[in-house]
């Protein structure tokens, strides 16, 4: 049986990764595609107090359980189903629920650190980096966190300046050099998305 095609989609918070991912999945209609969101793989923190969990830096690579993520991607490549963890953001640790995911012809991994881990990169056939100006990213993050997560504007701005921005410059921006294709302006760049989906279809037909 043919090996699944693995696609990594990285980029900063608010860069438009989700829009790019959605458009690629829509363009691959007719092929079996599974999306793995890196955010599901935040480390379990049940051994920590709630106060300790609140101090977790979710914009640092250490916040993610890459060993489990890599193991699951390998299982999907080998056409084996996996049980993906879920994360409870209210108590800041994993929930007891998991999501069963069946193997597909295309595996898309989307997340800010999708290209940060070398072992993970080595499993990918196509590596994408969504590159969007910082002013647009912070505005998108403001809107999302206020509307969907009940945050205040001051708290979002403080977190961005003290954590998100420095972590982006230190850990996320440098992963751009590992990408096969850089997509400026995210989901609005239809030309880049068309080129990418054409390449993926070629890989699937080989």
Image (tube, rainbow, N blue to C red):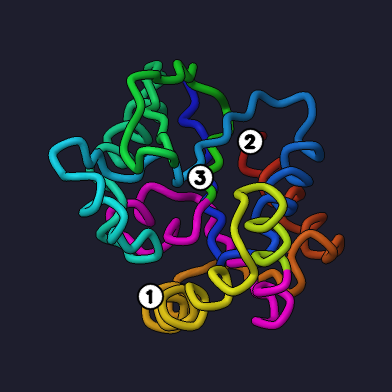
**Magenta stretch: includes residue 121:** yes
Q: Position of residue 26 (x, y in %)?
A: 80, 37
**Earlier along the polypeptide chain: callout 3 or callout 1?**
3
Q: Nearer the viewer, residue 83 or 78?
A: 83
Q: Is residue 149 above or below residue 130?
A: above
Q: Where is residue 205 shown, x and y percent of the image?
A: 67, 34
Q: Are marks 3 and 1 in contact (CB under 8 Å)?
A: no
Q: Residue furthest left?
A: 47
Q: Which residues are magenta?
A: 111-139
Q: Secondary structure at mark 1?
A: helix
- The percent coordinates of residue 188 (x first, y second) are 85, 64
Location of mark 3 (residue): 109
Mark 2 = which residue? 204
Residue at 83% across / 66% down in the picture?
Answer: 189
Residue 99 lies in the magenta stretch: no
Q: Which is more toward the observer, 46 or 39?
A: 46
Please tell me in which quadrant of the rendered image residue 32 appears.
Answer: top right
Give whichever of discs 1 and 2 has the lower sequence position. Answer: 1
Q: Nearer the viewer, residue 40 or 197?
A: 40
Determine the residue positioned at 45% across, 71% down.
178
Give the alpha-carbon distance from disc 2 to disc 3, as whole Å. 17 Å
- SS label for mark 3: strand
Tell me which residue sits at (30%, 41%) in the image. Answer: 70
In this view of the protein, which residue sits in the foreground, 194 or 52? Answer: 52
Residue 66: x percent and y percent? 28, 47
Q: What is the distance, in whole Å, between disc 1 and disc 2 at their CAs? A: 32 Å
Q: Alpha-carbon neighbours of circle 3 within 10 Å: few (<14), some, or many (≥20)? A: many
Left or right, residue 78 beside residue 137: left
> Can you tell which mark lies on residue 171?
1
């Amino acid at each position: 049986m043919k090996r699944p095609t693995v696609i990594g989609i990285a980029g900063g918070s608010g860069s438009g990764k989700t829009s790019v991912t959605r458009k690629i999945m829509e363009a691959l209609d007719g092929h079996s595609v599974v999306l793995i969101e890196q955010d599901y793989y935040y480390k379990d923190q049940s051994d920590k107090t709630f106060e300790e969990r609140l101090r977790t830096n979710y914009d640092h690579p250490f916040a993610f359980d890459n060993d489990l993520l890599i193991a699951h991607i390998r299982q999907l490549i080998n056409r084996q189903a996996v049980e993906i963890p879920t994360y409870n953001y209210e108590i800041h640790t994993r929930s007891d629920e998991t999501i069963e995911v069946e193997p597909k012809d295309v595996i898309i991994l989307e997340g800010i650190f999708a290209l940060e881990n070398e072992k993970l990169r080595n499993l990918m056939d196509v590596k994408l980096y969504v590159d969007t100006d910082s002013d647009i990213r912070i505005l998108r993050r403001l809107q999302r966190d206020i509307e969907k997560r009940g945050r205040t504007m001051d708290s979002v701005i403080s977190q961005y300046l003290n954590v998100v921005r420095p972590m982006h410059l230190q850990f996320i921006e440098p992963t751009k050099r590992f990408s096969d294709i850089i997509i400026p302006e995210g989901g609005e760049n239809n030309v880049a998305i068309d080129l990418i989906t054409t390449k993926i279809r070629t890989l699937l037909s080989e």
